[in-house]
Image (cartoon, grey):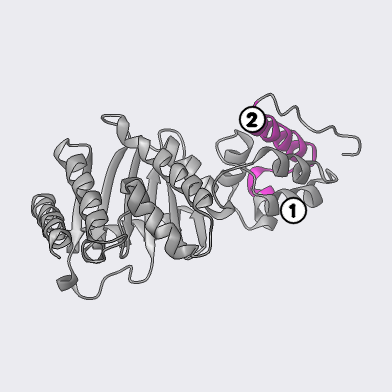
Amino acid sequence: MPGRKDLDPSSNPRALIGAELRHAREKAGLSQEACGEPLFVSGSYIGAMENGTRRIPLDIAIQLDKLLGTGTFFERNCEASEKSRYPNHFAEAVEAEARATTIKQYVPMMIPGLLQTGRYAKALFRAYRPTAMDTELDEMVDARLERGRLLNDPTTPLLWFVLDEGALQRPVGGPATLAENLRHVARQIRRNRIIVQVLPFSAGAIAAIGGGIKLMYFTDEPALAYIDGVGTGLLLDDPATVARHELTYDLLRASASSPEASLARIEAAAEEYSHGYQQP
């Protein structure tokens, strides 16, 4: 579409870009499914981008311009409007997290980001970025703690975590830092804000060795699954794929200790690390 102007950044850019996508798709005579097929995404994904609930990733924006004959319109506007304090592979997952009514998560070997304290998070970021400036790490910690404010709402979203026993035994940031974070988790459990089950080493082989799973559910959107690794992640909306990850999470939950036994284990570990820190 030659001559299309960039959108006004002072307005709601994602909603405007979504409306432009719908207009361009309909002008091209394509259904949502037909538009998504050459991009290897579902029709519901196209619909979510059109209604502004999902961002248009830059790589997809470039493909849309080619498919719909819009020059560089979507590339320019998506690149300008989607500034985020999070890495590209994670930014959309954070936005979905903020809209979710239910979040279920398993993270191997560490406390999940939503439950991390500042000192614990900074120790993790330092391990990932050993030469980074403290100011850079502080910005990353602030972003992580901002996500944790979801817990300030007394009821929403429903948060259910399967906590790997490795997280209770790996002293990230030292014994005192781990003890502090475990006490934080225990407080959230005792105030009935979160459900936590500890997956013990005695469970043996598990369905998600080597990877984390986050499932997110919404009032008026399809469920999403987010899987991640070191420096990478995928947000998935294909119903069959999400269902497979739901089964994996259910198998992990079935192998984990009860919430009551898990709380006792978390508090015992916090006490052990507190005492360990006090010893010379």
56 or 51: which is nearer to us?
56
| Residue 85 badge | none
Under circle 1, the secondary element is: helix
Looking at the image, residue 47 lies above or below residue 267: above
Q: Which residue is mark 1?
A: 63
Residue 276, visible in the rendered structure: yes
Vertical comparison of 138 with 249: above or below: above
Reply yes or no: does residue 277 show up in magenta: no
Q: Which residue is mark 2?
A: 15
Q: Is residue 187 left or right of residue 127?
A: left
Q: Amino acid at mark 2?
A: Ala
**Depth order, front residue of 94/37:** 94
The kind of residue tagged 1 is Gln
What secondary structure is the magenta-colored segment mainly?
helix
Task: Report if the CB atoms under discs 2 and 1 are less than 8 Å apart.
Answer: no
Examine the rendering and report whether any part of residue 247 can be seen: no
Please identify the residue farthest to the front as the structure is shown.
Answer: 280
Quarter of the image where one finds residue 123: bottom left
From the top left corner, tell me how far across and down residue 74 is, in percent: 75, 43
Magenta residues, start to end: 12-35
Residue drawn at the location 64% of the way across and 49% of the way down: 57
Q: Residue furthest right?
A: 2
The residue at 19%/54% (across/down) is 197
Q: Is residue 216 left or right of residue 90?
A: left
Q: Image quadrant for the C terminus?
A: bottom left
Q: Is residue 30 magenta?
A: yes
Screen quadrant of the N terminus: top right
User: To which quarter of the image does residue 157 belong?
Assistant: top left
Residue 242, horizontal then vertical, whole percent: 42, 55
At horizontal 44% and vertical 35% (from top left) the residue drawn is: 99
Q: Position of residue 192 (x, y in %)?
A: 17, 37
